[in-house]
Image (cartoon, rainbow, N blue to C red):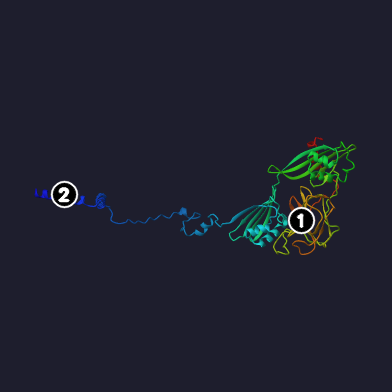
């Protein structure tokens, strides 16, 4: 009894002590009690220390030979870094050309060295498209963090995109040409006044009317021989790029029906017009763009060492050693595609003689024709000179077939006044196809 009395008395004192504790101390004691209770219920570990064990894999013969062998992760760190995305911070710049914009100003705004432009112009001598930008064209630049131009792209028009890429410290150029789709259109009409006005009413463009007149100029006088009521029939091939008319066209066939007789002209693959029987309507191509046979100072050479830059640079033309002011003549009928100045080529002319043939004349002292003008073989178009990047007075002449430069002194030129016998069958087939499209066969 005394022991029981003492326990009860001690319990009352403890309870009184707890009740008199501050609230914070009270909850601290309760928390400690439950923590000790939980710890006491956790079963003791059966092992007194950490278990260490080595695992040895057997060496298998199947892992020998060409199979990969594991290496430390640091062994291929450099190689792995090369596979990561390029975070070099190259910047892309897109600019739509406005009136007055120049590459020089664009490069200055982008902190690109002026010397780079000279290198690009030197690389552009193959295409001669970079010197004069036209409003609406798009220029795209890829520039490194240290303002090095890595690539330049000029979207000239729907059909042509010119690119320059820096490779091994040298800019290489490439002109991408979209051939598009050629579709034939047929025009006809009656003469009610002048041929030009009547042809315009039928839907022919000014350049197409000029092509019709040039094709028959040696056989027919449009001013004197046409009468009211005479009819004309013209088949035109038009180029479409991505569904849109590129404004590039060729007159394929012409029939003029007068009160006395009919006149015909059909375009052959050589870019010349022939009548229905295959007789030539214009002079054949001439081999030399100057009179006589002048001395050739530099021949066509795709592996030539450039005399100024000392780099391997193709010489895509023939250089004639003639003095400044020598007459330069068109080597075939055609239309002037470009006539202007290029820092490397100097004063230059590009003539489209047909869908297949193009001729170029560089380093001229004077240009006597303009863009869009139709010229005839033997027509005086320029005076030779020493402009642009040149080592002396001379004429640089090029002949291109399907947009590729060839040796103008060796290329097979249509020199006959008639369709060659071996080409006559194909000519007759194209002639008959044109006549059927015009409803004349």
Q: Is residue 440 above or below residue 150?
A: above
Q: Is residue 199 above or below residue 123?
A: above
Along the horizontal axis of the image, is 204 left or right of 87? right
Label 2: which secondary element: helix
Label 1: which secondary element: strand
Q: Nearer the viewer, residue 373 or 136?
A: 136
The residue positioned 46% from the left and 53% from the top of the image is: 62
Which residue is labeled 2 in the image?
A: 12
The residue positioned 56% from the left and 57% from the top of the image is: 89
Which residue is labeled 1 in the image?
A: 340
The residue positioned 80% from the left and 37% from the top of the image is: 438
Instruction: Specify the quadrant that holds the C terminus.
Output: top right
* Picture coordinates of residue 1, whole percent (x, y): 9, 48
> Given the current orientation, which residue lies at the most extreme left position?
1
Q: Distance of mark 1 from mark 2, alpha carbons?
A: 117 Å
Residue 205's disc is: none
Q: Residue 223: tell me if it is visible.
A: yes
> Local crowd at mark 2 within 10 Å, few (<14), some, or many (≥20)?
few
Q: Is residue 43 above or below residue 312?
A: above
Q: Residue 40: tell me if it is visible.
A: no
| Between discs 1 and 2, the one toward the N terminus | 2
């Amino acid at each position: 009894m005394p022991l029981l009395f003492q326990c009860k008395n001690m319990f009352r004192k403890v309870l009184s002590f707890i009740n008199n504790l501050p609230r914070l101390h009270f909850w601290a004691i309760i928390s400690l009690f439950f923590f000790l209770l939980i710890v006491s219920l956790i079963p003791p570990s059966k092992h007194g220390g950490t278990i260490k064990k080595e695992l040895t894999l057997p060496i298998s013969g199947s892992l020998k030979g060409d199979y990969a062998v594991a290496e430390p992760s640091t062994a291929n760190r450099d190689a792995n870094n090369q596979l990561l995305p390029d975070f070099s911070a190259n910047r892309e710049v897109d600019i739509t050309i406005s009136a007055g914009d120049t590459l020089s100003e664009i490069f200055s705004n982008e902190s690109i060295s002026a010397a780079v432009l000279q290198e690009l112009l030197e690389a552009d001598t193959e295409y001669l498209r970079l010197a004069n930008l036209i409003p609406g064209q798009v220029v795209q630049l890829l520039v490194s963090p240290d303002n090095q131009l890595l690539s330049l792209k000029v979207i000239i028009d729907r059909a042509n995109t010119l690119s320059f890429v820096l490779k091994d410290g040298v800019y290489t150029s490439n002109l991408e040409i979209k051939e598009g789709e050629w579709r034939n259109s047929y025009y006809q009409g009656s003469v009610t006044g002048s041929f030009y006005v009547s042809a315009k009413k039928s839907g022919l463009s000014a350049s197409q009317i000029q092509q019709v007149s040039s094709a028959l100029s040696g056989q027919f006088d449009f001013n004197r021989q046409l009468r009211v009521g005479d009819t004309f029939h013209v088949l035109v091939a038009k180029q479409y790029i991505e569904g849109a008319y590129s404004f590039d066209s060729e007159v394929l066939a012409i029939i003029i029906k007068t009160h006395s007789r009919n006149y015909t002209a059909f375009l052959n693959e050589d870019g010349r017009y022939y009548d229905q029987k295959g007789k030539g309507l214009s002079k054949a191509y001439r081999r030399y763009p100057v009179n006589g046979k002048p001395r050739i100072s530099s021949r066509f050479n795709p592996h030539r060492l450039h005399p100024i830059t000392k780099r391997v640079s193709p010489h895509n033309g023939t250089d004639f050693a003639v003095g400044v002011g020598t007459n330069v003549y068109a080597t075939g009928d055609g239309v002037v595609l470009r006539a202007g100045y290029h820092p490397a080529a100097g004063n230059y002319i590009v003539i489209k003689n047909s869908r297949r043939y193009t001729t170029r004349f560089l380093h001229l002292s004077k240009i006597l024709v303009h863009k869009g003008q139709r010229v005839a073989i033997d027509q005086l178009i320029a005076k030779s000179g020493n402009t642009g990047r040149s080592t002396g007075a001379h004429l640089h002449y090029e002949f291109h077939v399907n947009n590729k430069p060839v040796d103008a002194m060796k290329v097979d030129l249509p020199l006959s006044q008639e369709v060659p016998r071996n080409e006559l069958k194909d000519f007759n087939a194209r002639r008959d196809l044109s006549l059927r499209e015009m409803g004349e066969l």
